[in-house]
Image (spheres, helix red, strand yellow):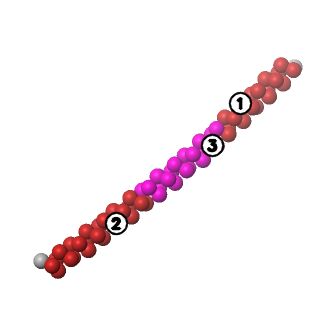
Amino acid sequence: MQLNLQLMLHIRVKVGTVLEDMQLNLQLMLHIRVKVGTVLDDMLLNLQLMLCIRVKVGAVWGTCC
């Protein structure tokens, strides 16, 4: 019976750590997704900025030439 209790305790600890690992992984994945999302947002913003600058420069060239 003592062996069974130790086994059950061991299994619970193992399951606990697995669940903790899973939670950690989920948090990590979420964190990575948020990071990737902000990176994509930044890229989009940069593209819009570049486009805006090109349009501005184009307009300047248009008035110059």
Is 35 located above or below residue 9 in the figure?
Answer: below
Count residues near mark 3 (Cα–Cα under 10 Å), then give few for <14, some for 14-19, many for 20+: few
SS class, disc 3: helix
Give residue 48's mark.
2
Q: Nearer the viewer, mark 1 or mark 2?
A: 2
Q: CA distance from mark 3 to mark 1?
A: 15 Å
SS class, disc 2: helix
Indicate the position of residue 29 as horizontal and vertical percent values: 54, 46
Q: Residue furthest front?
A: 64
> Residue drawn 21% across and 76% down?
59
**Magenta stretch bounds:** 21-40
Q: What residue sits right under mark 1 in the picture?
A: 14
* Residue situated in front as seen by the camera: 15 or 61: 61
> Residue drawn 17% across and 80% down?
63
Q: Residue furthest right?
A: 1
Q: CA distance from mark 1 to mark 2?
A: 50 Å
Magenta-colored stretch includes residue 39: yes
Magenta-colored stretch includes residue 7: no
Indicate the position of residue 14 as horizontal and vertical percent values: 71, 30
Indicate the position of residue 62 as horizontal and vertical percent values: 16, 77
> Residue drawn 42% across and 56% down?
40
Q: Quadrant of the N terminus?
A: top right
Q: What residue sits right under mark 3 in the picture?
A: 24
- First of labels 3, 2 by sequence position: 3
Q: CA distance from mark 3 to mark 2?
A: 36 Å
> The residue under label 2 is which amino acid type?
Gln
- First of labels 1, 2 by sequence position: 1
SS class, disc 1: helix
> The residue under label 3 is which amino acid type?
Leu
